[in-house]
Image: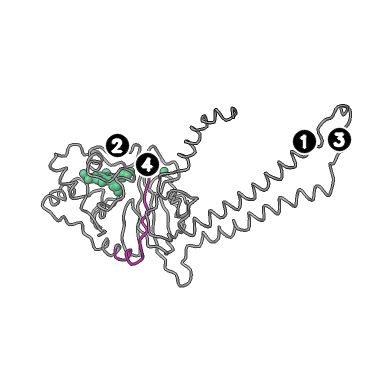
């Protein structure tokens, strides 16, 4: 049919919808929940949407009916339609129906709000505490029960209620793992709380969801959910790791690291100065990405160390450029960092 000939013009729109739907980004959809919090939040969203669809259908049906039934016909010019102001029956109907609809939304909302505020593990359930600190533009994860701190990649055991304390070192950030649930702001001077559970092992993408500066869009992180016994193993290894170099080249790298980097980046509980601070690098070799978003490889690591500002601008406490390192020192440093591994 001729009418459909220009349908192809809708293609760009289909493309935009495809991009907006987040296709291609693994585990970054709140519509594909991977844990109870995200499931409960999704069910609340769908309940509200059904109520809204119901309202829209009813209103449009009445609207269409009224348009047709009461339209002006020839000869109607002087007539005034029947007035209904003060009609008790109508007033009661259109007050009661919205109240009922609001109750349908309010009851699960209030129940969910309380359920999500309760970060204590349920009877007989395992719990784990994690303190999250937002920085321009990276994330710090501390396990206070184990005395372990890591950066960027958050390891959690599956099927375990993770109770988060959320804080910020500089400006307001927001901690969001769409597939698991959320989100919650990290606010300087305030400790917010929330909890999450990951049902299945996997890598879940996380984002900062509060505009926090020039590189906000790059403030990504990963949640790595592993089986509880693997997690135990991992956290024991991290707490015992010292970051000792294993080869002669790495040993040279370690020396460069001690003189240039240890002032900001702790490794194995040593170093790191809270006043000029960067992510703990004890498990850097296991990272999913470099600096939260760059593909994890040696070229990017070197490029980052030589000039971090080409990747992220506008941080309050940025990492300085180390372009003056000799190629030999740089190679040694890269070798040292790439081999800081905890996972087998
Ligand atoms: C003044 C403090 C400071 C110094 C000194 C410093 N860094 Fe950094 N570094 C940072 C900060 C802050 C970040 C986080 C930047 C971001 O992701 O927004 C960072 C990030 C990194 C990352 C990415 C970490 C990750 O989790 O992906 C690497 C790798 C790194 N630095 C290596 C080094 C090396 C190697 C040196 C020494 C040659 C060094 N840094 C010196 C502050 C510092
Ligand atoms: Cu942000």
Q: Residues within 10 Å of mark 1 (few under 14, many from 20)?
A: few
Q: Are marks 1 and 2 in contact (CB under 8 Å)?
A: no
| Nearer the observer, 154 or 324 | 154
Q: Helix, strand or loop at disc 3?
A: loop
Marked residue nearer the N-terminal end (3 or 1): 1
Q: Residues within 10 Å of mark 3 (few under 14, many from 20)?
A: few
- Label 3 near ligand 2 (CB < 8 Å): no
Does residue 29 appear in this view? yes
Q: Is 74 in the magenta? A: no
Location of mark 2 (residue): 309
Location of mark 4 (residue): 218
Q: Distance between the residues labelled 4 and 2?
A: 12 Å
Q: Position of residue 302 (x, y in %)?
A: 22, 41
- Label 4 near ligand 1 (CB < 8 Å): yes
Marked residue nearer the N-terminal end (2 or 3): 3
Location of mark 3 (residue): 81
Q: Which mark's residue is nearer the viewer, 3 or 1?
A: 1
Q: Which residue is drawn at 50% across and 62% down?
A: 118
Q: How far apart are marks 3 and 1 (CA)?
A: 13 Å
Q: Position of residue 308 (x, y in %)?
A: 28, 39
Q: How far apart are marks 1 and 4 (CA)?
A: 52 Å
Marked residue nearer the N-terminal end (3 or 4): 3
Marked residue nearer the N-terminal end (1 or 4): 1
Q: How far apart are marks 2 and 3 (CA)?
A: 70 Å
Residue at the front extreme of this rendering: 1
Q: Residue at x 57, y 54 (%)?
A: 44
Indicate whether 4 appears above or below 304. Answer: above
Indicate whether 162 appears above or below 123. Answer: above
Q: Helix, strand or loop at disc 2?
A: helix
- Horizontal side of 312 relative to 176 (left or right) equals left
Q: Residue at x 22, y 54 (%)?
A: 340
| Residue range (magenta) | 216-233
């Amino acid at each position: 049919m001729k009418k459909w000939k220009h349908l192809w013009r809708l293609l760009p729109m289909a493309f935009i919808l495809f991009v907006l739907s987040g296709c291609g980004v693994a585990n970054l959809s709140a519509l594909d929940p991977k844990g109870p919090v995200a499931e409960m939040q999704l069910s609340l969203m769908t309940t509200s949407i059904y109520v809204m669809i119901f309202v829209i259908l009813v209103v449009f049906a009445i609207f269409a009916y009224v348009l047709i039934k009461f339209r002006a016909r020839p000869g109607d010019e002087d007539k005034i339609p029947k007035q209904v102001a003060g009609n008790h029956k109508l007033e009661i109907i259109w007050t009661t129906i919205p109240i009922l609809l609001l109750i349908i939304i309010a009851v699960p909302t209030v129940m969910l709000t309380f359920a999500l505020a309760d970060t204590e593990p349920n009877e007989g359930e395992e719990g784990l505490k994690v303190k999250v600190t937002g920085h321009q533009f990276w994330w710090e994860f501390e396990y206070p029960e184990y005395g372990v701190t890591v950066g960027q990649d958050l390891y959690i055991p599956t099927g375990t209620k993770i109770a988060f304390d959320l804080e910020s070192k500089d400006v307001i950030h927001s901690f969001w793992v769409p597939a698991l649930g959320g989100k919650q702001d990290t606010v300087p001077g305030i400790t917010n709380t929330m909890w999450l559970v990951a049902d299945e092992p996997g890598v879940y993408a996380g984002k900062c969801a509060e505009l926090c500066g020039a590189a906000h869009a790059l403030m990504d992180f990963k949640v790595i959910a592993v089986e509880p016994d693997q997690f135990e193993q991992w956290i024991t290894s991290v707490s015992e790791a010292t970051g000792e170099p294993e080869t002669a080249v790495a040993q040279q790298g370690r020396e460069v690291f001690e003189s240039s980097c240890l002032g900001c980046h702790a490794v194995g509980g040593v170093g790191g100065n809270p006043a000029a601070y960067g992510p703990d690098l004890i498990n850097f070799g296991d990272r999913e990405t470099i600096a939260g978003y760059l593909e994890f490889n040696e070229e990017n690591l070197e490029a980052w160390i030589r000039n971090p500002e080409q990747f992220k601008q506008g941080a309050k406490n940025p990492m300085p450029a180390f372009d003056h390192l000799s190629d030999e020192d740089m190679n040694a440093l890269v070798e040292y960092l790439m081999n800081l591994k905890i996972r087998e």
